[in-house]
Image (cartoon, grey):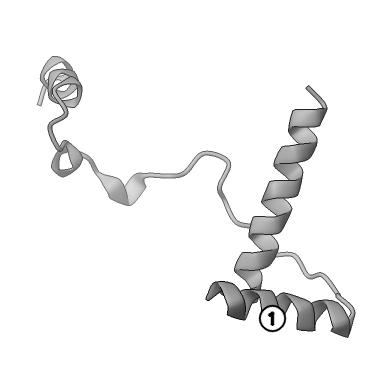
Amino acid sequence: MKAEKFDQQFEDDVDITASLDLSKARRVLQTQKRVNVDFPTWMIESLDREAKKLGVTRQSVIKIWLAERLQMQQLQSI
């Protein structure tokens, strides 16, 4: 498919995913890197309670909370 046709389909809100090679797709700035963090027991228990309440994993709670805090910090530094 030529670029002009692809662009036109995109602009016309046509589903173009069949024309894409998603096996090579990457999310910008979303590569994963493993880190180890030690938390006190009381903090782990609190995280687990919150995770259970939200129906997600402990790791998800940590990621969400850290992301929210980092976004707040970025907005404050602007």
Q: Is residue 76 visible?
A: yes
Q: Classify the position of the C terminus by image quarter.
A: top right
Above or below: residue 46 compared with residue 78 = below
Question: Label 1 belongs to which residue?
Answer: 49
Farthest top residue? 4
- 72 sits to left or right of 16: right
Above or below: residue 22 compared with residue 64 = above
Q: Nearer the viewer, residue 78 or 4?
A: 78
Q: Is residue 33 visible?
A: no
- 31 sits to left or right of 47: left
Q: Nearer the viewer, residue 69 or 11?
A: 69
Task: Report x, y in % for residue 35.
Answer: 75, 65
**Which element is circle 1 on?**
helix
Q: Residues within 10 Å of mark 1 (few under 14, many from 20)?
A: few
Q: Amino acid at mark 1?
A: Arg
Q: Residue at x 16, y 36 (%)?
A: 16
Q: Nearer the viewer, residue 28 or 11?
A: 11
Task: Report x, y in % for residue 77.
Answer: 82, 27
Task: Report x, y in % for residue 47.
Answer: 73, 75
Q: Classify the position of the N terminus by image quarter.
A: top left
When asked about the image quadrant of residue 46, the answer is bottom right
Q: Residue at x 29, y 47 (%)?
A: 22
Farthest front residue? 53
Q: Residue at x 64, y 70 (%)?
A: 59
Task: Report x, y in % for residue 64.
Answer: 64, 57
Q: Residue at x 69, y 81 (%)?
A: 49
Farthest right residue? 40
